[in-house]
Amino acid sequence: MRGKSDAGWPELLQRWKAEQNELRQRIVVQPLGELPRYIGGADAAFSGDKRTIYAVAVVYDREEKRIVEVAESVREVIVPYVPGFLSFREGPAILEAVGKLKHEWGVICFDGQGYAHPRRCGVAAHLGITLDRPGVGVAKSRLVGMFEEPEESAGSMSPLMDRGEQIGMVLRTKDRVRPLFVSVGHRVDIESSCRLVMACCTRYRVPEPTRQADIEVAKLKRRYEGREC
């Protein structure tokens, strides 16, 4: 795995910044229209020693409220965690898992930021653009920006602002629970993104595509870590 003390590390970070700045210029913001029945979801986790990444992609059926497909990827971790560059660490494994899906899906939710990122290119934007498919960032915590707390009822929201620009929406999906931070990834707009998240929430705060991806990636990790033990 590359290390932060390696020769050429500062140059690598500059290349990553340049790539993010180039990708953000390619983000397409447009209404999603009618919400699709089948929604993708993706998440990743790391082994205890941080040398292996486990990624899962799922397809969720909104009408039947169930997962219809799960695809997995297990890869060696190439780079360490660097704030603001999560897509370079997790992206290859997530893209591999998404690429294994056979069932159709109309939009994919990522467990992370989209436009709500210091360089406006978080994992949901980076991977959405790479796939050239509609993608939404659904994060459980804020990375950047300021906001006023939404009202306590489900569906309440307030804009997430940074340097005078709205970069996302702070959305409360259930009554009196902590809000989510929703932002555009690619080929959606913020209104469509929030509608999608609310439509995919059932009993839980987190929408089912990313919630189920999180559950499946935990299973995958236990399977491999148990095997190693």
Image: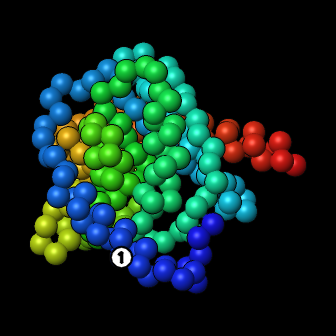
- Compared to residue 143, the image places residue 212 above or below, namely above
Q: Is residue 24 visible to us here?
A: yes
Name the spot of residue 101 as percent of width and height, x first: 47, 27
Q: Nearer the viewer, residue 137 or 125?
A: 125
Camera-nearest residue between 51 and 15:
15
Residue 141's spot in the image, x, y percent?
41, 61
Q: Residue furthest right?
A: 229
Q: Secondary structure at mark 1?
A: helix
User: In the rendered view, does 11 fall on the left or right side of 121?
Assistant: right
Question: What x and y, as percent, mark residue 32?
Answer: 18, 33
Above or below: residue 117 compared with residue 223: below
Question: Where is mark 1, residue-wise?
Answer: 14
User: In the visual, does 93 lie left or right of 224?
Assistant: left
Identify the residue shown where x is 50% and y is 40%. 96
Residue at the far front in the pictured view: 7
Amino acid residing under circle 1: Gln
Residue 204 in view in this figure:
no
* Quadrant assignment, res 109: top left
Q: Residue at x 37, y 68 (%)?
A: 16
Q: Residue at x 32, y 46 (%)?
A: 130
41 in relation to 1, above or below: above
The residue positioned 83% from the left and 47% from the top of the image is 228
Please tell me whether residue 182 is drawn above or below residue 32 in the rendered image: below
Q: Quadrant of residue 118?
A: bottom left
Left or right position of 6 against 130: right
Looking at the rendered image, the quarter that the N terminus falls into is bottom right
- 51 sits to left or right of 156: right
Q: Would you identify the image quadrant in which residue 86 lies?
A: bottom left
How crowded pointer 1 is (Cα within 10 Å; few <14, some 14-19, many 20+) is rated as: few
